[in-house]
């Protein structure tokens, strides 16, 4: 598939997203999921953890309490983009990199075989923000894709030079990148698909992000609703095949 804006995005029969935490899917693929559903496609999302340590106030939000909230948030967020098929992998937040890749992949293989997706989306090897859980779920998904014969297209979420030009300073200021992280950057000619959201599509993504209020409300309050919405108005994906060739 060649790079396309949302208005020309090729139809995806079945899309499978594999992510580490609730809200990963909203930031990086809400537009893609919404577009697929609008065109009659099936969308299935897999989340490895409940993100139970995703707080700066663990006294107020102990893991058992936060995990319940984040389950509810994920369900509401997915509903905003018309997605109702979801699977948990039941791992602990922050523990994915301690799981052997072979074991993680083995958990995903039956799901991939059952769903039989046309396209799988996940993090690239760098984990977008550099988070160890993100890097781990990328490795698991890539290995599971290999074990299932690479029958689906595997796309990694990525960023462009344009994103870094327009939003790099803000991303750095709010601490989006982990220490020593090297966020991805792809040239437009390298992309499989670019989803540029405007109007009702962008409003829908904004609602999907807002549904993850425990994670997104403070950030939106910090930068302002309009700026926050535009910050995540473009989604970019690069083929794993291209990344493998370039890293070979």
Image (tube, helix red, strand yellow):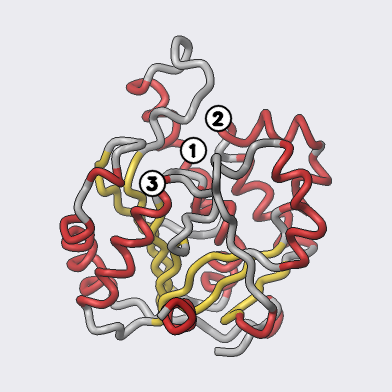
Give the residue at x 70% y 36%.
174
Which residue bears the numbered disc 2?
A: 214
Answer with mark 3 or mark 1, whichever residue precedes in sequence. 1
Element type at mark 2:
helix
**What numbered label is drawn on residue 73?**
1
Q: Are marks 3 and 2 in contact (CB under 8 Å)?
A: no
Distance from Cα at disc 3 to Cα at disc 1 = 20 Å
The answer to whether mark 2 and mark 1 are in CB contact below 8 A is yes
Of mark 2 and mark 1, the one earlier in the sequence is 1
Crowd class of label 3 (few under 14; some 14 to 19; many from 20; radius 10 Å): many
2 or 1: mark nearer the eye: 2
Image x and y of residue 145, in percent: 29, 74
Q: Gap between marks 3 and 2, in whole Å?
A: 19 Å
Mark 1 Cα-neighbour bin, 10 Å: few <14, some 14–19, many ≥20: many
Looking at the image, residue 77 lies above or below residue 42:
above
Q: In front: mark 3 or mark 2?
A: 3
* Identity of the residue drawn at 45% across and 68% down: 121
103 lies left or right of 112: left
**Residue 133's disc number:** 3
Instruction: Pinpoint residue 191: horizontal percent, then vertical percent.
Output: 61, 79
Which residue is more in the foreground, 129 or 50? 129
**Residue 228: x %, y % from top left:** 76, 45
Q: Residue at x 67, y 28 (%)?
A: 218
Q: Is residue 24 above or below residue 222?
A: below
């Amino acid at each position: 598939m060649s790079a396309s804006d949302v208005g020309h995005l090729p139809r995806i029969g079945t899309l499978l997203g594999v992510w580490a935490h609730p809200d990963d899917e909203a930031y990086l693929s809400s537009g893609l999921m919404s577009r697929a559903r609008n065109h009659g496609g099936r969308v299935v999302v897999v989340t490895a953890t409940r993100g139970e340590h995703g707080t700066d106030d663990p006294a107020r939000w102990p893991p058992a309490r936060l995990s319940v909230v984040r389950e509810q948030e994920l369900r509401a967020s997915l509903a905003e983009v018309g997605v109702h098929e979801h699977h948990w992998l039941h791992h602990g937040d922050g523990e994915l990199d301690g799981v052997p890749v072979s074991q993680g992949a083995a958990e995903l293989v039956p799901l991939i075989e059952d769903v039989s997706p046309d396209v799988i989306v996940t993090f690239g090897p760098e984990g977008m923000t550099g988070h160890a859980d993100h890097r781990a779920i990328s490795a698991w998904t890539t290995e599971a894709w290999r074990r299932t014969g690479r029958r689906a297209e595997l796309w990694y979420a990525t960023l462009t030079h344009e994103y870094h030009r327009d939003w790099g300073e803000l991303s750095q200021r709010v601490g989006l990148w982990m220490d020593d992280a090297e966020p991805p950057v792809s040239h437009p000619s390298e992309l499989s698909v670019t989803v540029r959201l405007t109007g009702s599509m962008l409003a829908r993504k904004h609602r999907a992000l807002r549904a993850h209020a425990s994670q997104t409300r403070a950030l939106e309050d910090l930068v302002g609703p309009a700026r926050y919405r535009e910050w995540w108005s473009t989604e970019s994906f690069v083929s794993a095949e291209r990344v493998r060739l370039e890293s070979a």
